[in-house]
Image: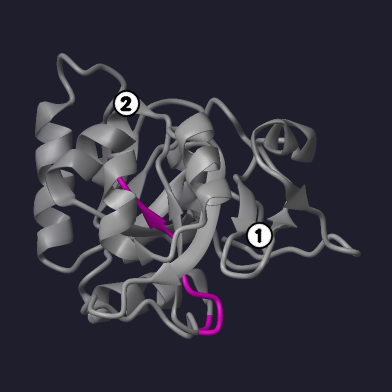
Amino acid sequence: MSVDRIKDATDPATWGPAIDEAVHALSRGELVVLPTDTVYGIGADAFAPTAVQALLDAKGRGRQMPPPVLIPDVRTLDGLATHVPEGARALAEAFWPGGLTLILDAQPSLAWDLGETHGTVALRMPDHPAALALLRRTGPLAVSSANLTGRAAAVSATDAYEQLAASVAVYLDAGDAPGQVASTIVDATGEVLRLVRAGAITLERLREVAPVVAPAAEGGSGR
């Protein structure tokens, strides 16, 4: 496949056609690679189960590792999650948009299938203008790091294309990802907030806002 799939999304003044193309691809159930403030992500309509499955297939990933969901606004939190602890809400207010993913109890009425989530959803609001421009058009997107499972996360659209190629319809290219490190993940579904994966935001910074307990052994989540 040619690299015509890669579309320039570096300048808000000129990225309109690229964003339009990505929106149309997502509406057809296709996949899009988008820049975020951490690494590049591969995205699908969160409410289209076949698109989410295509995302997992593109990465070579099973349903036991469901993708997180990126949202355009902190206020979207209560539409997608329930029983949000005050500590988690404080973290969202402090670090969104930014490199924090919160695992929360999902609203039971939502008609989506992200995989074997056990009734939870991992939410994040990215701090990247192109990603937010897309999300404001599409609403919540299921987004995982833009790489084949077991490979390094893509920090550019070209990196992503070299791994995912024709499985993705549109690649939004905004240059190198500014963060180049994955988001920090906090599980807010239990009695205490628990660090699942250290990443863009340190445990010390989290604890300045809310009590967060680190696990006995650091483990990867892949989200």
Residue 26 image point, x, y percent: 17, 58
Q: Relative to residue 56, is residue 219 drawn left or right?
A: right
Look at mark 2 in the image and give the residue it sits on. Answer: 129
- Residue positioned 84% across, 60% down in the render: 218
- Above or below, 58 relative to 134: below
Q: Relative to residue 55, is residue 87 drawn left or right?
A: right
> Can residue 32 be seen at all in this image of the molecule?
no
- Above or below, 82 relative to 124: below
In front here: 152 or 73? 73
In front here: 163 or 105? 105
> Magenta segment, which residues?
62-72
User: Which callout, 1 or 2, points at the residue further toward the start of the chain?
Assistant: 2
- Residue positioned 17% across, 69% down in the render: 29
Residue 6 image point, x, y percent: 30, 40
Q: CA distance from mark 1 to mark 2?
A: 26 Å
Check the picture and name the quadrant holding the C terminus: bottom right
In front here: 17 or 141? 141
- The amino acid pointed to by label 1 is Arg
- Residue positioned 35% across, 33% down in the render: 173
- The amino acid pointed to by label 2 is Pro
Check the picture and name the quadrant holding the N terminus: bottom left
In front here: 88 or 214? 88
Residue 16 is a magenta residue: no
Label count reads: 2
Q: Relative to residue 177, is residue 71 drawn left or right?
A: left
> Can residue 204 be seen at all in this image of the molecule?
yes
Q: Is disc 1 placed on a helix, strand or loop? A: loop
Mark 1 or 2: the one toward you:
2
Look at mark 1 in the image and give the residue it sits on. Answer: 151
